[in-house]
Image: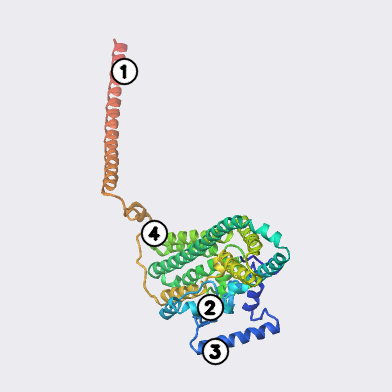
Amino acid sequence: MFYPDESSSGGGRPRAARDFARGVSPLPAPSREAARRRRRRRAARVARSTPGDDDAADCDAPWATDADPGLNADLLSEPGCLSVARRFTRDDEWREYQSPRRYFEQMVTINGSVVARRVTIPALVIAAWSAAVGFASAAFPAVAASVSRAAPFVAVVGGAVSLLLAFRTNAAYARFGRAADSFAEVIAMTRNLSRKMVVWCPVEDRDAHARLVAAIPWSIKHRGQGIEGTDAAREELENVLDAPQLERLDLGSNVPMQIMTEITRGLDAMNERRVELIYQLLMDNDLTALHAQAARTDRLVGTPTPVSYSRHISRGLVLWLLALPAVYASACPIWVLAPASLCVAWLLLGIDDIGMQLEQPYTVMSIRQFCQECEEEVKREMGESAWTPRIGKPREDVLESDFLNPEMTEFEKAGKRRRASVSREGGERGAGMSEAKRSRERRAGGETKTREVAIEASVALDSAG
């Protein structure tokens, strides 16, 4: 499992990977010479049409010559070649990978296996322990015979350890698969957003939006690999964004969210160009989905398999490998016991190490090529398009229409029309009632005035009489 190097800068990136990204070899002079000899031998094998090492095969893929600074350098067969995962882009690569010759080829190239190199020292320690137990068994046969009676218990524990290893490896591979699926969704949603902006984004704003959209996969990649805020991540973003866009970003704090916020501001500014609101809503839906995938990346990176579970399995496996030769020492000669223990230790420790390698999937996946291809496609499609978006109606007219509710059923539309009709009739009825009331008030006022005149006339007559 990859643990960050907190003693140096780089945001958790291995020192060897940072040195390699800067063009500085992390190896001393003798190791560099040995590495050059290994590369020459591999080149000679390729020239003879023989495969390379068992995990990396040929190193002539496009991504092989362009090192990803976010990869874990400890899991590289050689600079530029992935040892855990690679992207197959040609049919002949799949044919070679599935060829029946793989059994022989993988055995004769075992010296190039990263897994074999990583577990060689622990396996040799187990073999040396087995040899020491064998000599002690020959010196004290009675003790060895007593210890051998525990063989059934060791066998039962071996079954449990094997099951735990299987569960642990399956869980790690499930994390690897979820990470691959999540990044594939990021690429698909980015292309989908680009497709919509090609048609609906104003032409004069299209170049700026193309850069921002193309930078989304890169920023999520940096966050997944743990290199966000480093010089290496900045260099990759400088190849995508222009200087003003880069200056507006705080490269040390959730760059994907900042980029998507910039795009959202651009969507809001489309109101001034009278772009249909439904188009803005559809593009914003893609940004919401990209936010969800970025959060999924954070969850995968920040929540590994429980550390206590991994440690307990590793401790149990080592203790079982140490107990195994003790219970079989009396039945096996030392020249059989040590090699057998070496093979068993190499096999089981390798399975455990593969699970640990897959714990951080973004540092072993070839996702840089996906980002490069997506960037080229987005910039080319949005840069070459001269399509002018359709101008919509004014905002008030759109809000008052059914345009924002295209999925309303006929029943809902009929109810809406009925409510509008009732409201209109109520207004007319209210207007009629108001007119009648005013007429009654006028009549009542006239009658009151007539009575007052009659009373005044009567009073005048009485006074005259």
Earlier residue among tags 3 and 4: 3
* Mark 1–mark 2 CB contact (< 8 Å): no
> Residue 392 appears at what percent x and percent y?
35, 62
CA–CA distance in space, label 3 to label 1: 133 Å
Residue type at mark 3 is: Ala
Earlier residue among tags 4 and 2: 2
CA–CA distance in space, label 3 to label 4: 62 Å
Helix, strand or loop at disc 2? helix
Q: Label 1: which residue? A: 456
* Mark 4–mark 2 CB contact (< 8 Å): no
Q: Is residue 27 visible?
A: yes
Residue type at mark 2 is: Met
Q: Label 4: which residue? A: 277
Earlier residue among tags 4 and 1: 4
Q: Quadrant of the C terminus?
A: top left
Earlier residue among tags 3 and 2: 3
Earlier residue among tags 3 and 1: 3
CA–CA distance in space, label 3 to label 2: 19 Å
What is the number of the mark on residue 427?
A: none
> Residue 146 appears at what percent x and percent y?
68, 57
Q: Nearer the viewer, mark 3 or mark 1?
A: 3
Q: Is residue 236 above or below residue 306?
A: below
Helix, strand or loop at disc 4? helix
Residue type at mark 4 is: Leu
Quarter of the image for residue 221 reads bottom right
What is the number of the mark on residue 107?
A: 2
Q: Quadrant of the N terminus?
A: bottom right
In the foreground, 438 or 204: 204
